[in-house]
Image: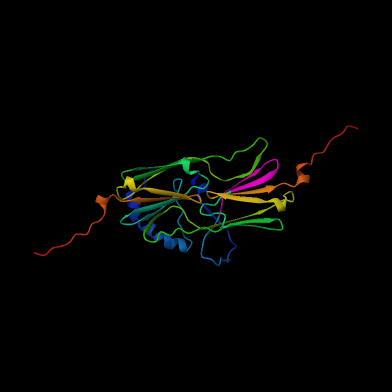
Amino acid sequence: MLVPFERFFDPFVTMRPFLRKRGEFPRRRVEFPPYNVWLSDDGAVITTELPGVSPENIDITVASKTLTITGSRENEEVQNGDSYHRRERWYGNFKKSIELPFIIDVQKVSALFNRGILKIELHRVEEEKPRKINIKSE
Amino acid sequence: MQDELSKKEVETPEGVERTRDEKVFLPAVDIIETKNDIVIISDIPGCDENSVDITLEKNILTIHCKIYKNNISDKRFVLNEYEVGDYQRVFTLSNEVDRDKIQAKVKDGVLKVILPKLEQVKSRKINVTSE
């Protein structure tokens, strides 16, 4: 699913950190894996929690404004005769795309996987960056 | 399905507050019993070996993980699909665990606690003889 552009300007999203402090975090369905996104004039940072996924099993693709993360996590290996007392952790394949409000510079994408958290830094293409225009008086 | 995957907060008794202004989540676990061990596998993204605390008091095993905060202060937080906080989960152990040989490992945000079974429990096979 593509996250619509408008969501970045959704007032409820802006309010969420404040609501969260008061324990009123609105519950909603989020496609797996959940992303946290930060934005600036220069680019964006996306983080997602993928514990136990080896970096070789994560694929990051960038096309125009869209970032896609695909990957998988294997089930724990179980020997014959072993039994599960509890089974709560997820496993399987995942794929999720997100649309950013700018064209991503493919050359400058960097990704870091640390302690089970994937952090991707994206930059705006140079031509798209906001530019200051000097005003001349005649 | 999504609700099962989203993080669940640790419940506190009504009127009781934490001193730290942080959320605490229940990490998802798989518990597998093998021939020799009981293995607890837990998802604790954001934690490493230095931030995990495992304590055993009497027969209560407590796993507590402090997360490292992401410092992205130069940007606006625009999309919040998951919350970040510490993890805590408490288990009661049966008498069949060898307390002195408990091992724990952390890799890529996954904690693995190996609780070996006591020798005498392992070999508790009863021979049946005919009269």
Q: Residue at the location (49% across, 56% down)?
A: B84
Residue closest to the eye, B20 or A138 = A138
- Quarter of the figure with residue B49: bottom right
User: Does the stretch in magenta take in A109?
Assistant: no
Left or right of B8 on screen, residue A7: left
Left or right of A45 on screen, residue A52: right
Residue closest to the eye, A3 or A110 = A110
User: Does the stretch in magenta take in B39?
Assistant: yes
Left or right of B2 on screen, residue B16: right
Quadrant including the N terminus of chain A: top left
> Which colour assignment does the render follow?
rainbow
Residue A95 can be seen, yes or no: no
Q: Is residue B11 above or below residue A110?
A: below
Residue closest to the eye, A23 or A108 = A108
In x, y percent, where is residue B63?
61, 55
In x, y percent, where is residue A41?
30, 56
Q: Residue lying furthest top in this view?
A: B130
- Quarter of the figure with residue A84: top right
The residue stretch that appears in magenta? B26-41
Q: How many marks?
A: 0
Quadrant including the C terminus of chain A: bottom left
